[in-house]
Image (cartoon, coloured by chain):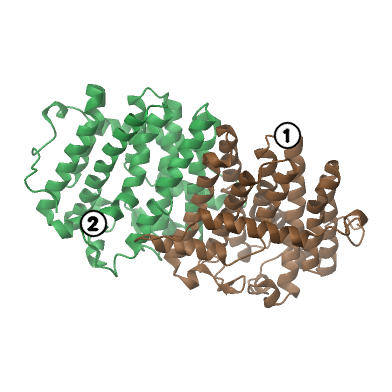
Chain colours: A green, B brown
Amino acid sequence: MPRSNDQPAAGPPADLGRVSVSDGLKAAAAAVDAELDRLIPPAQGLHARALEAMRYAVFVGGKRLRPYLTLAGSALFGVPEPRALRAAAAIEALHTYSLVHDDLPCMDDDDLRRGQPTTHRQFDEATAVLAGDGLLTLAFEILAAPPTHPSGDVRARLVSRLALAAGAEGMIGGQMIDMLSAERAYGEAEIIQLQQLKTGALFEFAAEAGPLLAEAGEDDLARLRRFARDLGLAFQIADDLIDVTGASETAGKTVGKDAAQGKATLVSIYGVDEARREAKRLAHSAADALSPYGRVADELRSLPFFLLDRAA
Amino acid sequence: MPRSNDQPAAGPPADLGRVSVSDGLKAAAAAVDAELDRLIPPAQGLHARALEAMRYAVFVGGKRLRPYLTLAGSALFGVPEPRALRAAAAIEALHTYSLVHDDLPCMDDDDLRRGQPTTHRQFDEATAVLAGDGLLTLAFEILAAPPTHPSGDVRARLVSRLALAAGAEGMIGGQMIDMLSAERAYGEAEIIQLQQLKTGALFEFAAEAGPLLAEAGEDDLARLRRFARDLGLAFQIADDLIDVTGASETAGKTVGKDAAQGKATLVSIYGVDEARREAKRLAHSAADALSPYGRVADELRSLPFFLLDRAA
């Protein structure tokens, strides 16, 4: 259980009150969408169907939260925007692959994603598997290519970190634990591990991509990772709250699925009120991690509170 | 149609008669299996099932033909064996991912692979999708890590080339074309394109990984790619011949599937005899590509003829 005597303030810190995350998210989404449009052009030829499905999956939309993390983290360290945009696009491609595969009938069997037919419903299962494989591969292709950074060491390091975050000891491991959750009674520790792998690992990479591109020091990398870890868990609790309390229109996907599938979540363990308090505590902890950067980090520091508002 | 007036000799060139590819393949398989065993250790913890399935899929066996190409190509250019082995293991991990996903019910729906239950039959579909995703991700993780090569530029270049070979304009594109082949009447050109993407692209990368690790020149890369391109097509024709004429014991997988699924192959278009002749022509063309390297390339040059013998 979260420490109940560690009550955070009700809202964001007063100095963050007027920062608009919403505008930043919109600008980041527009920029990363333009980059993805360049990186996954409409295809011709016999193999085009896989690329069409990749484009479909990517352009169904979404908040572009991970690319935003990368762009905001890059701005904090003065990374040239074209490089940051390539890393952001790679991360969104990788995130989209995970959604396409997670939605498959043999996984979560979802028909809707962001209010639109999932890729296997719009195309077919084989095409969805291949489109996911293609997006995963594309993420590494983007990071490894010279326009992402002049230094091969930096590019190889980006590939390494993303592969670790996404692999069987990261996001894939988290999805594996999630697939087993319907038949096992997970407790708090298991669910936190699940979320940390399934969501947290890629959040961490998205946040540290900026300092990695800037060749910043280990202290900076650690701060951005800590920010992302707490943010990711807060975000996941918010998502679980929407699954319990939200409407399909807001969520853009099928709601009530976790309960229907008998999956425990932090919300089912804590209860709604305690889950909200824990999410707020995590939001404050995330914001604190960035305090060394002062006012230039204000927009990023208000992101956790913005995300919690979705689930209020 | 292949040029029928371009009749190659019946067997391999006389100077290759005594070279044993068989021993080389066995040694390469043992070495790469030991490397894969280190790189995918038995796992503990909640997420272990995905790693177990990755190990299962990899250690079901196989000829390790692609790792052999990488090791033999590396030896030709004096690449230290530990580096060559990492590249070879990455390529085999990537090849195995493609088999795991291609075998899925929504793709080729195969129950047997190398005489053993396919990964989704041994585990379940969700685990097989995740194991494939994990192996694909692992391939890039291995190539990008410093032990593969001291130069980040070389590591990033390996990642780039593999991503292009494996992606939607490479192997994934080939599988997409293959999935559509049952409902479309492909001709020779389409089938050659299919094979070039589905099999040839990864063969080419496996062969050029050695010169890439050696930072050899473009001429060397082009020669090794040409060797692999002709080898890959010859190998695919041999595989199609086994599908028509072979026994399940030899093939280790379900035979007669292409015909049952109404898929055209070069064998169904050329006929068995003409297909054998074309495969031999390609084998000679492949061997010729390596003639500048003299006797040290003899074992690699005899590989195409060794592979054709399987289908004789």
| Residue sitting farthest toward the left | A5
| Residue annotated with mark 1 | B218
- Judging from the image, mark 1 belongs to the subunit labelled B
Q: Residue at x 16, y 55 (%)?
A: A245
Image point (23%, 56%), residue name: A189
**Residue B224, can we see it?**
yes
Left or right, A207 with respect to A248, comes to right
Q: Is residue A243 left or right of residue A51?
A: left
Quadrant of residue B80 in the image?
A: top right
Q: Position of residue B276 (x, y in %)?
A: 83, 64
Structural distance between the alpha carbons of marks 1 and 2: 53 Å
Reply above or below: A268 against B252: above
* Residue A287 picture quarter: top left
Badge 2 marks a residue whose secondary structure is: helix
**Residue drawn at point x = 76 percent, y = 54 percent:** B231
**Chain of the residue where label 2 is placed in the rendered structure:** A
x%, y% of residue B216? 71, 35
Question: Closer to the camera, A108 or A271?
Answer: A271
Q: Residue A263 falls in which quadrant of the image?
A: bottom left
Q: Which residue is mark 2?
A: A189
Q: Quadrant of the C terminus of chain B?
A: bottom right
Label 1: how many Cα within 10 Å (few below 14, some 14–19, many 20+): few
Q: Is any part of residue B176 visible from this angle?
A: no
The answer to whether B36 is drawn above or below residue B213 in the figure is: below
Q: Amino acid at mark 2?
A: Ala
Residue type beneath disc 1: Glu
Residue A11 at x, y percent in the picture: 11, 37
Which percent across, then down, holds residue A181? 29, 64
